[in-house]
Amino acid sequence: MKNREPLVELPHALTDPRPRPDARFVMGIDGGATKTLAAVLDLESKALHLGHAGPSNEDAVGPQRAVQSLLEAADQATQRAGISREDLSAAVLAVAGTDTSAVTRHVRSACNDQWIVVNDVVAAWAAATGAHPGIAAISGTGSNVFGMGSDGRVWRAGGWGHLLGDEGSGYWLGIESIKAALHDREASGPDTALSAAACAFFGCSSVEEVAALVYSKPLTKGEIAAFATEAAKLAVHGDAVARELYGDGARELAGQILVVIRQTGLAGAFPVGLIGSVFKAGPVFVQPLTEAVHEFMPGARVSVVEMAPAGGSLLLAARACGHEALDLEELSRLTGETLAAQSSAP
């Protein structure tokens, strides 16, 4: 008998939060394959304090290094807020990876029960929907889709990592672009500007050198995913092969969105939030995805979400304390302004 239980469940602390009128400081963390961002929010003053660290995707760096990055980012953010870990009323750590159980165990041994670990797509869903019925689709280095129906049913599709999935992600687009360049080289596929772009991007004199680099170095997920940015530029400027790849990737991701719609029972008008660096490609990626979703569910409101994923974690942390009144637009503006100010600081 097939197991059809949800792959991701919302923790009890989020579905049945315990109100804490005295709550003041909450923390949200966005942990990915390339970097980790922690944000501490003062619920009284609305001051936001950030901390940064390296990757915290267990699949990429292992559970111990992942937790080390999570705690490093957390400690940096709490120090900037002038508090300690113990002063946090709640913390939600949204971590990328196929399975976060090992990270959860390590965090539990180092911190108190107010620290909640969830898959990163759960925080993306909160950022996209305000933690209400709807769907979030992540496409960054990896890809993942999560949603909740009006009756509370949840479902995740995708998120199996670069070897078994991540369709429509930066990694998927990067590796498919390299494959297209190799097919051009051996004359088994059409001519494409991706060939010259791959050589220039990876500092190689030939496409075959790029192929050797993939195996011999080997190139990391992040390095391959970064090439998707170059492929996007070519797609926007009309390279037929690059455009087709972006269309294929969009439809792959849309297929996972449709699975989540069916499994959660969503119907009518509901948000489908698109979160991640790949959506910066614009219409060449967003339009075919939107068309594929609307063919099945015309009422879905598909849009790119501007709020940083750490904002979704903050929203969930506030919810765990019973603070439901945190405004999504205000939080989005606050996180955006704080990130911009920090990145421009000397």
Image (spheres, rainbow, N blue to C red):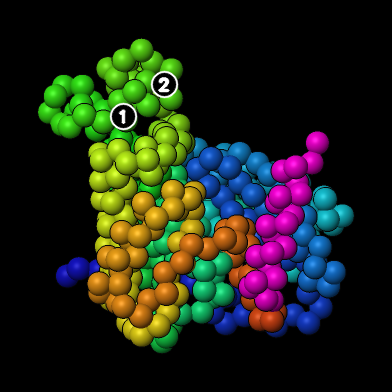
Q: Amino acid at mark 2?
A: Ala
SS of the residue at dot 1?
A: loop
Q: Start and end of the magenta stretch?
A: 326-346
Determine which residue is flagged by label 1: 193
Q: Residue furthest left?
A: 188
Asked which quadrant contains residue 259, the reply is bottom left
Residue 344 drawn at (x, y percent): 75, 42
Tag shown at residue 200: 2
59 sits left or right of 308 in the view: left
Q: What residue is shown at x 41% (from left), y 39% (from top)?
A: 233
Instruction: Based on the picture, tell me whether residue 307 belongs to the magenta stretch.
Output: no
Q: Quadrant of the C terminus?
A: top right
Q: Kindly report which numbered mark, 2 or 1, lies closer to the viewer in this rendering.
A: 1
Q: What residue is shown at x 68% (from left), y 44% (from top)?
A: 52
Residue 336 drawn at (x, y percent): 68, 57
Say above or below: 290 vs 19.
Answer: above
Q: What residue is shown at x 34% (from left), y 84% (from top)?
A: 267
101 sits left or right of 211 in the view: right
Asked which quadrant contains residue 337, the reply is bottom right
- What secondary structure do most residues of the magenta stretch adopt? helix
Q: Amino acid at mark 1?
A: Ala
> Observer-nearest residue: 50 or 15?
50
Asked which quadrant contains residue 287, the reply is bottom left
Q: Exactly how many numbered labels are in the figure?
A: 2
